[in-house]
Structures are given as C-alpha cells and as structure tokens.
Amino acid sequence: MCGIIGYIGKKDSLPIILEGMRRLEYRGYDSAGVALVTDKGLTVFKKAGKLSELVNLIGVNGFRSNLGIGHTRWATHGEPTDQNAHPHCDCANEIAIIHNGIIENYLTLKRKLQADGHTIRTVTDTEVLAHLIEEMYKHSGDLFTAVRKALLKVEGAYGILVVSTREPDKIIAARNGSPLVIGVGEGENLIASDASALIDHTRRVVYLEDGEVACLSAESFSTKTIHDEEIIKEVEEITFDLEQIEKGGFEHFMLKEIHEQPESIYNSLRGRLQVDQGTAKLGGLEPVLAKLLAAPRIIITACGTSWHAALAGKYMLEQLARIPVEVDYASEFRYRNPIIRPDDVMFLISQSGETADTLAALREGRAKGATVLGIVNVVGSTLARETDAGVYIHAGPEIGVASTKAFTSQIAVLSLITLLLARHRGLSAEQGRLLASDLMSIPAKVSKVLEISPHIRAIAEEFKHVRNFLYLGRGSNFPTALEGALKLKEISYIHAEGYPAAEMKHGPIALIDEDMPVVFIVPKDAIYDKVVSNMQEVRARKGRIIAIANEDDKEIDALAEYVIRVPRTYNFFGPIVNSIPLQLLAYYMALARGADVDQPRNLAKSVTVE
Ligand code: G6P
C-alpha cells in the first residue's frame, strides 16, 4: 500500500521526508516522489522504481524547504511510471497532493473538470483530486475549505496530504479508509500513513479517523470533520517498536495479511459490484466483453495458490454463466502444445504478474490466437502489460510468502466476472441481486471468522506433532481443500494433501488411522449429506476429524472431534470464507512448530524462473 509522509517545521524537510519514505518501503511500492514548498514555488521530483533512483534524480541541490510531502506509490490507476508517481499538481502548479486509496468516481469528476477547462496530464485518479481542489480554491480562497469541499464530492477511499504555495505554512490532511497519523513535535509536526515514519522524531501521535480533516502548521494542528464540525483529538504515546508498527502489531506479515482480508476483499468489490442491479461493472473487461460472451470456452492458467483460485472460478463460471472452463497449470499448458480455437479466451491469474510459467503460458496462448486476459494484483507488472485486457484485484501488496489475501481477492474478482457474464447469459436480475448481496456480505463474514482465531489456535496446538494431514471437500470446496493443504505444507512443513472428498476411497483412505487428522470443509449445501457420508467413512477408521461447518449446523458435533464454525455463504463464493480458518490453522500450526512463517524454507514470493 502506498506510503505517505509530510513535514512542517524549522528543519530542512527533504532529508526528513526521504528518511520517512525509506521507513515506509516495507509496505511495497513501485515509484516515489516528493513535493517541497520553497520561496521559489513548488518543487516536485518523482521517479518510477526504487527510492534510490529518486535520490539520484534529486541529486545535490541548493534549496532548503521547511515544508514538504513524500509518497511511495503502489500503483492502482495507471502504470508505475515517472509521470503517474505522486505528488500530482493542479493546472497552475500551486497545489500538490499525495494520496493513498482509490477515488471511485474519478472518471465522472475528470470529465466535468476537463469541461471546465482543466488540463489533466495523467491517467491517475489522484491528479483529478488536485484539480478538484484547485477548482474549490477559486471559490473559497482557503486551502482547508477547498480540500474539505472537494472531498464532499468524492466517492472512495483516501488518505491525502495537500500543500500549496498560496498557503506555504500548512499541510492539509484528510482520511477516509486509509490511515493517517499525526506526529506531534516541538516546533514541528509530521504526518504519515503509519507511525514507523514518525518515531525517529516523536512518539506523541494523533490518529485521524475516517471523515476527519486536519491542518498542520509548525507550531500546532487542528482537526475538523469533513462537514466542518470542530473536533478535539487526544494525543497518544506510542509504546511499540518499529518492527511491531510495520507488521501492524501482528507477529508476522502473513497474520497481518490474513486479518486484512475483510478490507482487501471489499477493495476488490468496491465500485464494481452493483447490488441494486444484481450485476458487476468491470471497466477493464469492457473492450473485450463481446469476445468473452461469444467465447465457446474459457481457459484459465496459473500457478500455486492462483491456480486454486482458478479452479474455484471454474465451478462458479460453469454453473452460473454456463460457459465451459478449462483450468490448467501454466507450467503444463506451455509445453503441451495446447489446442486453441480462434474464439477461445484465456484468463491468466497471478498475484505478482511476474511468474515465469504464467507469462510463458500467456505468450503461448497469444501465439496460438487466443484473447489473453489478466487477473493480477501488481499494477503494471509484466502480465498486466502483456495481456489484452484484465481486472486488477486491488488486494494491496502481499509480503508474506504464503499467499492469503491475494487468493480471496482473486476469487472475489472471479465472482464479479461470473456475475457479469451470467447476467448477460440469462441469469435473472432477481437472482443477480441475491448473488450480489451475498458477495457484499462476505467481508463481514470474514471478520466473524477472524474472531474465532483463539479456537483455531487451540486446535493447532493439539495437532502440532502430527506428520500428515488430509483436507477434503466437494464441489466448489474441493479447491478450498487444495488451498488449505498447500498453506499447511508451505509454512509448517507438515505433509498435507487435498482431495475431492468422494475420491478419498480410491486411495487416501488407506492412510487413515487414529494418527491421521482429516479436515472436512462441509458447508450446508446441496452435497452436504454426501460429505457427511465421507466423514462417516473416516470415523469408521478412527481418523480424527476437524470440520469447517456452518454456524447453524447441529448435526456436525456428533461426527467431528473439532468444529470450526463459519457463516453460511452462497455455495460458489464459499471458498472465500471457508479458506480463512484454513489459513489460520496453517499459520498457528507453523507458529506452534517454531517455523519462520514469513520466510518459509525453499519458497520464493515470486517465482520468476522456470
Ligand atoms: C509462488 C508463491 C505462491 C504463489 C505462486 C504463484 O510459488 O510462493 O504463493 O501462489 O508463486 O504466484 P503468482 O504471483 O503468479 O500468483
């Protein structure tokens, strides 16, 4: 996620800002920039790539500034280029803004501003905001009011800092969804997206809440709501260290990312899911929608966890949109001389957008004439650039090697694609609305599952010495079983296999005895009774059952030794909610066994070699 830092005081702001940005590097970024207010006006430097490249660009300069802002960008709208990097300025180059978040209605705002004569130079949502503030400034002549009034017109999430040469003694900040924290100093004030960038200067902080706007000067700060009501904020003392701050107070990035899922899933759906119309709007697919609807089949290729998301996508796309879907490992697809028909459409799913086998599959599909589409997290990655079109999952940077939030966001995006195609292929508006509102309820359901972490941790403690695990599920929860087993293997080094529950009797049943824990994913769906029969088979052989079951399932306690309860979700979206306890189980197993969760042995976050 983007990093934000601002400084106002008596010191030279540039070194303070660059050091703050270095502290924020851990959040993940692809470009960086600073804006300094000097007596000569606004000085802006921005550069794609690492912070060191920005430092080289700035070089040795002779000016001093007591007021500046800096930003590390993780691209959402527009590729990570020099031009798209923040800060962004208004037409007159008097206002500079940095932004973390997504402005959903930026296209509407952009058209209006262009009609009013503004020249908008980049494709970013953030630049639109700079011009909107410029427009508001014309009426109010006051930066604080201009920012506040501009934000009243904005839909979306933001944490922003704004500076202007017209009022060179202040930083305006506002928050809605993206955190900002003020660092209260002596004759200086700072503000950042998290406290890691501040604690070298002060441990006295003020956390902004959603809907709040702040004005910082060197000597003081004030806060109001976006609706102009005064608010008095309390200054708090930070007691935790840098490492704790970076991990958001969690012990590992993986756990932090597991807990981010209510938000990351919502970010995947935000502005796209149209609950009232019972459909989804995916701007990235609009140019290829006709091709997608005419396609005789869809081929999805990916690797690892992304492949499991692909498989979950097959279940929903075939059942709801009635399009045949083939799912293939990218590494297999690339070498098996696949048969591609002219109208075939391929989706390639990748968190990083850099996985070597997935890129090779993309090039193979394209060479054979398929339309190639991406479902990608990292904006501007190779896969995003080389595909004909696609959808970003907007999960934010994933640092933990074992993928968690990218998986659930990939399935959320596949759900949106399914809904969109299904509605075009005969699903009624009423059914569409039911599905859309179920999807919208998923972030809250994920939050509920996260609350039972202590129960899952206790189960992990109980099983930490076992050597093998079996994960079983049917239908759309077969991919959930595969993903649960993969998570356990990856970080706890326990041998685990995922299987379709009924397939167990064709082999894995031979493994079952009193030492074999079996995780069943058994939601109350149309094949519930079938899975229960499979559970009986395990019980008859003294296997130890852990069931992921629905909250209202009364029968399950008689069958399972441990039950992890999850809220009911529409069948095909189930893997999103049902995979959360499996992520937590794997995490706590690894923790109990003393494994290094964020640096699992032999694994890489991004596999850029064959
Ligand atoms: C590596 C990672 C996995 C990931 C896979 C595919 O193996 O450790 O977590 O699922 O690559 O990565 P991608 O970036 O293409 O989704």
Image (cartoon, helix red, strand yellow):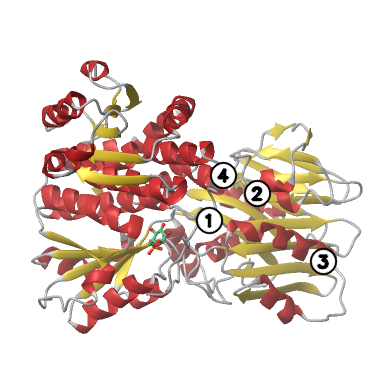
Query: Upstream in the sequence, badge 3 or badge 2?
Result: 3
Q: Which residue is mark 1?
A: 399
Counting residues from the N terminus, which is met first, the one under dot 2 or under dot 4?
Answer: 4
Check disc 1 and report its element: helix, strand or loop. Answer: loop
Q: Secondary structure at mark 4?
A: strand
Q: Which residue is mark 2?
A: 246
- Residue 291 point in image, percent of width and height: 16, 70
Would you call the spot at circle 3 few (<14 residues within 10 Å), some (14-19), or many (20 or more)? few
Quarter of the view holding residue 126: bottom right
What is the three-letter code of the residue carrying label 2?
Glu
- Type of amino acid under label 4: Asn
Closer to us: 445 or 140: 445
Q: Amino acid at mark 1?
A: Ile
Identify the disc placed on residue 176: 4
Q: How many numbered circles does the render carry?
A: 4
Q: CA distance from mark 3 to mark 1?
A: 27 Å
* Residue drawn 24% across the image and 25% down it: 542
Tell me whether circle 1 and circle 4 mark residues in contact (CB < 8 Å). Answer: no
268 relative position to 44: left or right: left
Callout 3 secondary element? helix
